[in-house]
């Protein structure tokens, strides 16, 4: 195992207080600190998150304001250059990152809540409830989500980040529901769950306090995947022209770049940054996920 | 087996009904008047033509009749193959416009999906459990699946078409040529086809390779692999058994990923202005041509259902147990 000295992610792992007697936690931390995929992935995500949060504070003009000379390549004043209209691409990039994180977190979050709820109830209850929910999951799974979204969003006159995230959340949950269901199915027959059921606790309490904690690592990983997926879907929607009206996002930047033929004009600084932002963000989320998988799943650890 | 197929067909039937119902509901329950908002953007200068169009669309939506009647007449129109008349290319029927674009999209999707699936699976199986490959190919694979389709299309167009000049940047074929079965036209068609195909292929490749790699590792942990290993079977043999077992979830994965792949094709087409369904969709959005948009939606859903059905048949042929495998989505 290679330990990367001085990697930013290592610090917050070490600063977490070690709970007394919680051997499992410290063991997980032990492996987490030594997993390069987890460290690299999480530090890139953190850096991008900080850029999105803090970056806009240091830009004293709005992302869509016409501030500079037109069609300038990157320079010391305009780090990422300017658009055909003289908008600062760096300003657009940091604001876009912020809204990308927002849609990803909210859309992925809604999908996560819907997916895990349906998965838990289906897997734990079984019988006719399972049949119906499974049918629903399969139907939504087969429907091409992106195309449904395009049609639905096209009819909306007022489009904002919130609505976009809500729609993405409501269409991208099925595979998470299926995955959670299969896990819950196997956990629901364990002895301690039977015991809890005998003691007369309500279903919801059993799910949240007995079943869910035993697959928490699995849940965290599904959330990260949904997060990344939501970002990609949002970028696609923005690119088609169904993005937040008057707002700014990485997908919208790509749309504008193509719409104003940055490609033919050779203005690479217009379409490289937003695409790189999305790719690096989602890619490091996936790699972070592999790292988490290796930390939680002893079978995958390379020793 | 028949029970399995019956269940599947049942689900597809329900999905189709749901899709049609969504299609019917969206214009009626979204805020605003669909007819006027559609025609306001259509930029028609002739007032008489506008009046005729308004009357036609009011009639088609049938907004003054009771809801259930609207719903049934919607279905009736569907079975007659009547999806309405386009606003953008008035008075051409939507079905004709779509049928013209479908070959381009299918010609892009099928080779990209099949080739990336085969090659990605090979790569993934090869990389699994070999440290160097795992540590180099795996991150590349993840970065590839995380790439938005339109961005890789942009990069390829920039590198190979604008800067390199090897391929044309836009369109399905040169406008100077008329479609024919001549060598000139076909080679022209292929050179326009190559870049959109390549960008779809590259993104999809990463996902399959990762899926296969994970499945192989899982299979190598299974009892039969350990047993074979204990017997001293050659590594190649164990690998081959693992590969065949890992194929099954990958086939199911093909069905799960189909929607994402189609969305990717639509986005890629837009970048290259390729005359398939994606570009058509963008045009219908820009012209607020909801009939065309909804027609495309129905066509895509039908295509997905047919493809799912074919994958199910393949699955039954490949795996006699026809058990439903679980696969976690990779994106």
Image (spheres, rainbow, N blue to C red):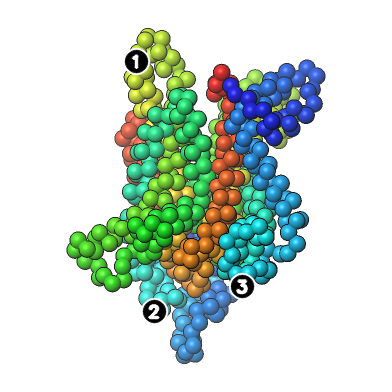
Q: Tell me the mark number nearer the camera, choosing from 3 and 1.
A: 1
Q: Is residue B185 above or below residue A209?
A: below
Residue of label 1: B234
Q: Which residue is mark 3?
A: B32
| Camera-side mark, 2 or 1 | 1
* Whether labels 3 and 1 share one chain: yes
Q: Nearer the viewer, residue A184 or B118?
A: B118
> Residue B140, labelled with which disc?
none
In the picture of the structure, the residue carrying the numbered disc 2 is B91
Give the mark nearest the N terminus, 2 or 1.
2
Q: CA distance from mark 3 to mark 2?
A: 24 Å
Disc 3 is attached to a residue of which chain?
B
Q: Is residue A84 left or right of residue B134?
A: right
Local secondary structure at mark 3: loop
**Image coords of residue B278 (percent x, y):** 43, 61
Question: Quadrant location of residue A1?
Answer: top right
Q: Which residue of the protein is positioned furthest toward the left in this rendering?
A: B182
- The Cα–Cα distance between marks 3 and 1, rounded to whole angstroms, is 68 Å
Q: Real-space Cα distance between discs 2 and 1? A: 68 Å
Nearest to the observer: residue B189 or residue B237: B189
Give the secondary structure at mark 2.
Answer: loop
Tag 1 or tag 3, which sits nearer the N-term? 3
Residue at figure coordinates x 35%, y 38% from the top left: B118
Image quadrant of residue B167? bottom left
Q: Is residue A23 above or below residue A122?
A: above
Does residue B295 appear anywhere in the picture?
A: no
Number of marks in the image? Answer: 3
Where residue A19 appears, as percent x and y from the top left, is: 79, 22
Please tell me which residue is depicted at 80% across the width and 19% down the height of the picture: A20
Position of residue A105 measured from the top left corner of the image (x, y, whole percent): 66, 47
Residue located at (60% from left, 40% from top): A285
Residue at point 38%, 43% (across, down): B116
């Amino acid at each position: 195992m290679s330990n990367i000295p001085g990697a930013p992610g290592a610090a917050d792992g070490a600063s977490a207080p070690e709970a007394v007697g919680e051997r499992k936690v410290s063991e997980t931390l032990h492996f987490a600190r030594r997993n390069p995929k987890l460290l690299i992935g999480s530090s890139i995500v953190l850096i991008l998150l900080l850029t999105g949060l803090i970056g806009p504070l240091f830009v004293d003009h709005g992302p869509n304001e016409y501030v500079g000379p037109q069609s300038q390549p990157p320079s010391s004043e305009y780090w990422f250059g300017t658009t055909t209209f003289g908008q600062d691409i760096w300003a657009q990039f940091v604001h876009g990152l912020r809204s990308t994180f927002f849609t990803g977190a909210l859309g992925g979050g809604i999908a996560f809540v819907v997916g895990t709820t349906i998965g838990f109830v289906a897997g734990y209850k079984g019988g006719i409830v399972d049949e119906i929910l499974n049918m629903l999951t399969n139907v939504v799974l087969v429907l091409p989500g992106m195309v449904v979204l395009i049609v639905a969003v096209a009819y909306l006159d007022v489009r904002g980040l919130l609505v976009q995230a809500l729609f993405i959340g409501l269409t991208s949950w099925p595979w998470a529901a299926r995955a959670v269901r299969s896990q819950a199915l196997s956990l629901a027959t364990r002895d301690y769950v039977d015991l809890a059921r005998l003691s007369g606790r309500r279903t919801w309490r059993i799910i949240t306090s007995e079943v869910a904690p035993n697959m928490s690592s699995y849940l965290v990983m599904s959330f990260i995947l949904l997060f990344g997926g939501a970002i990609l879907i949002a970028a696609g929607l923005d690119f088609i022209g169904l993005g937040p009206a008057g707002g700014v996002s990485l997908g919208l930047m790509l749309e504008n770049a193509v719409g104003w033929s940055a490609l033919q004009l050779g203005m690479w600084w217009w379409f490289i940054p937003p695409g790189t932002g999305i790719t690096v963000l989602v890619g490091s989320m996936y790699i972070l996920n592999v790292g988490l998988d290796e930390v939680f799943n002893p079978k995958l650890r390379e020793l | 087996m028949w029970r399995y197929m019956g269940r599947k067909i049942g689900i597809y039937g329900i999905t189709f009904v749901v899709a049609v119902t969504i299609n019917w509901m969206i214009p009626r329950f979204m805020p605003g008047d669909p007819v006027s908002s559609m025609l306001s953007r259509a930029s028609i200068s002739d007032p008489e033509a506008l009046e005729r169009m308004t009357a036609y669309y009011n009639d088609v939506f049938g907004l003054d009749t009771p809801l259930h009647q609207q719903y049934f007449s919607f279905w009736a129109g569907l079975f007659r193959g009547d999806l309405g008349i386009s606003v953008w290319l008035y008075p051409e029927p939507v079905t004709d416009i779509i049928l013209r674009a479908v070959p381009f999209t299918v010609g892009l999707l099928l080779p990209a999906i099949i080739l990336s699936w085969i090659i990605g699976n090979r790569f993934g199986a090869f990389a699994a459990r070999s440290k160097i490959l795992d540590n180099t190919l795996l991150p590349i694979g993840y970065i590839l699946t995380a790439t938005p389709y339109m961005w890789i299309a942009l990069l390829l167009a920039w590198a190979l078409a604008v800067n390199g000049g090897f391929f044309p940047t836009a369109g399905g074929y040169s406008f100077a040529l008329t479609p024919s079965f001549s060598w000139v036209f076909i080679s022209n068609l292929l050179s326009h086809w190559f870049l959109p195909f390549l960008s779809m292929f590259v993104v999809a490749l990463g996902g399959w390779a990762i899926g296969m790699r994970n499945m192989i590792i899982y299979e190598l942990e299974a009892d039969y692999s350990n047993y074979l290993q204990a017997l001293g079977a050659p590594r190649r043999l164990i690998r081959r058994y693992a590969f065949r077992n890992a194929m099954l979830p990958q086939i199911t994965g093909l069905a799960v990923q189909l929607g994402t792949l189609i969305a990717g094709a639509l986005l890629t087409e837009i970048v290259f202005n390729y005359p398939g369904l994606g570009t058509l969709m963008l045009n219908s959005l820009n012209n607020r041509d909801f009939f065309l948009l909804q027609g495309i939606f129905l066509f895509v859903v039908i295509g997905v259902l047919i493809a799912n059905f074919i994958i199910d048949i393949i699955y039954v042929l490949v795996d006699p147990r026809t058990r439903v495998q679980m696969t976690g989505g990779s994106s």
